[in-house]
């Protein structure tokens, strides 16, 4: 996780004037005030947090535990939050918590294979109608077949709408890697949807 | 642009993440290449299908669980020293000699260091000013109304900068943006005085009153002072007298 080691930001309550803000900086805000600020800042991203955890872990009960743990961690570390995008900051913690959970509780997914070299993207027969008709179950199955490292990028981009730069921050990757993983992930999703509807479909 | 060049860029094109020039190239290629155009359509269709159906929403029970847990969990918001000390026992063999070395280095560091530090800040301030006038990024919120500019900073900074317009005194507030100086996000207030653009960088000080100190760097005049709990850096290509005038207004 990329946290700043500076004595960080204190969330300033709305409506503060400059004098009060300057005064507040010297001392810590009282706890309840800070706690309310924390909730106001980060609770709106609960759906995003849950969605990411749900797709990384592929399990709803585990996702709930991980998101709760992530929020408690975020509360502990919110002294290191120095402005910027609260959603990206929170999702970074959720992602790390989920991966820690995975490594503790399950054997990790097999590493991303270099399948692309053998099956270059060109080979995909593109049937747009098939994608448009794909039902929720097929989409879900296709998503779950993706390696976690690819799936999380699709979730952050296509479900949560993060920019490549924000994804790079959350997943701690260079932007170029975000771009290429996303392209490969989508291409695999299309392949999977194709397989699922034209026989050879796995359960 | 050939198919080979365009292929790896199609996803970023759909996501509007390409720079303008490359995006134009891709668009031109798409008008000529049916296969790539179809590929783009399929990416769009996939994105649409995913965003419409596959986003999981947090169950209400989880929301309640979290609010409860947050309410009863201790808030550890201690200064970093505490955290460093907690970390010590596990790796003390490296940490303690390192800490001693760091303390010695600080003690032995010549006073020049402080000068270098502030000189670095001066360069940062000038660079930030130049950047803001070169790149099309002078203001994130363009308004001469301080009631528009001030609330805009809320949530973007951990402090509330004083925002005032001095149009009656020929220093017109043009807008504001968030910049990054001295290792932290700061407020940049942009004023206009005749043909001159002025950046006023503001962030919380340690509380002491300092300055004003006028200096010149790379053809720009800078004025630095600390007042009412804030550090102010004024930077512009206007003359010293005018710098003094604006500084006096900001301190009034």
Image (spheres, coloured by chain):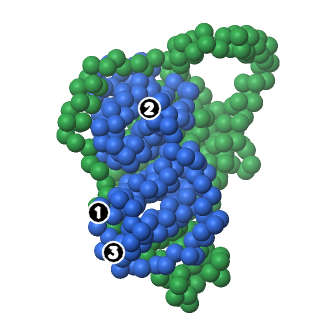
Residue B51 place in picture, x, y as percent: 33, 62
Q: Which residue is mark 3?
A: A132
Say which quadrant the C terminus of chain B sits in: top left
Q: Residues within 10 Å of mark 2 (few under 14, many from 20)?
A: few
Secondary structure beneath label 3: helix
Secondary structure beneath label 2: helix
Q: Which residue is mark 2?
A: A105
Q: Which residue is mark 1?
A: A136
Q: Chain of mark 2?
A: A
Residue B172 drawn above or below residue B68: below
For chain A, give the colour.
blue
Residue drawn at the location 50% of the way across and 17% of the way down: B79
Q: Residue furthest front?
A: A200
Q: Which chain is green?
A: B
* Drawn side of residue B71 relative to residue B142, left or right: left
Disc 3 to disc 2, C-alpha distance: 37 Å
For the residue pair A26 and A117, the one nearer the viewer reads as A117
Disc 1 to disc 2, C-alpha distance: 28 Å
Q: Quadrant of residue A140?
A: bottom left
Residue drawn at the location 46% of the way across and 17% of the way down: B78
Say which quadrant the N terminus of chain B sits in: bottom right
């Amino acid at each position: 996780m990329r946290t700043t080691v500076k004595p960080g930001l204190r969330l300033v309550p709305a409506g503060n004037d400059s004098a009060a803000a300057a005064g507040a900086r010297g001392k810590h805000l009282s706890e309840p005030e800070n706690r309310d600020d924390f909730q106001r800042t980060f609770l709106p991203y609960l759906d995003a947090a849950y969605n990411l955890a749900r797709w990384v872990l592929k399990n709803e009960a585990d996702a709930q535990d991980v998101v709760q743990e992530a929020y408690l961690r975020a509360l502990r570390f919110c002294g290191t939050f120095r402005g910027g995008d609260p959603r990206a900051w929170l999702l970074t913690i959720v992602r790390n918590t989920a991966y820690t959970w995975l490594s503790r509780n399950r054997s990790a997914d097999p590493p991303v294979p270099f399948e692309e070299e053998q099956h270059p993207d060109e080979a995909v027969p593109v049937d747009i109608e098939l994608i448009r008709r794909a039902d929720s179950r097929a989409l879900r199955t296709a998503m779950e077949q993706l390696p976690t490292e690819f799936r999380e990028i699709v979730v952050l981009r296509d479900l949560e709408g993060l920019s490549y730069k924000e994804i790079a921050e959350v997943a701690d990757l260079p932007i170029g890697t975000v771009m290429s993983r996303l392209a490969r992930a989508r291409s695999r999703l299309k392949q999977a949807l194709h397989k699922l509807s034209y026989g050879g479909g796995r359960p | 642009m050939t198919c080979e060049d365009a292929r790896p860029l199609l996803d970023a094109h759909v996501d509007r993440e390409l720079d303008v020039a490359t995006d134009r190239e891709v668009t031109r290629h798409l008008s000529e290449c049916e296969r790539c155009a179809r590929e783009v359509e399929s990416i769009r269709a996939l994105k649409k299908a995913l965003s419409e159906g596959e986003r999981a929403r947090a169950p209400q029970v989880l929301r309640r669980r979290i609010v409860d847990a947050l309410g009863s969990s201790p808030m550890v918001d201690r200064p970093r020293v505490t955290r460093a000390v907690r970390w010590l026992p596990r790796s003390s063999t490296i940490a303690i000699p390192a800490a001693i070395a760091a303390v010695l280095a600080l003690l032995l560091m010549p006073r020049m260091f402080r000068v270098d530090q502030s000189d670095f800040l001066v360069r940062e301030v000038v660079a930030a000013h130049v950047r803001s006038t070169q790149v099309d990024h002078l203001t994130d919120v363009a308004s001469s109304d301080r009631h528009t500019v001030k609330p805009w900073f809320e949530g973007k900074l951990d402090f509330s900068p004083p925002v005032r317009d001095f149009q009656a005194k020929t220093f017109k507030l043009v807008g504001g943006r968030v910049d990054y100086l001295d290792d932290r996000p700061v407020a940049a207030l942009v004023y206009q005085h005749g043909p001159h653009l002025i950046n006023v960088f503001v962030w919380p000080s340690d509380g002491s009153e300092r300055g004003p100190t006028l200096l010149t760097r790379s053809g720009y005049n800078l004025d630095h002072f600390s007042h009412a709990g804030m550090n102010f850096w004024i930077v512009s290509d206007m003359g010293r007298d005018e710098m003094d005038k604006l500084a006096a207004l900001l301190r009034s």
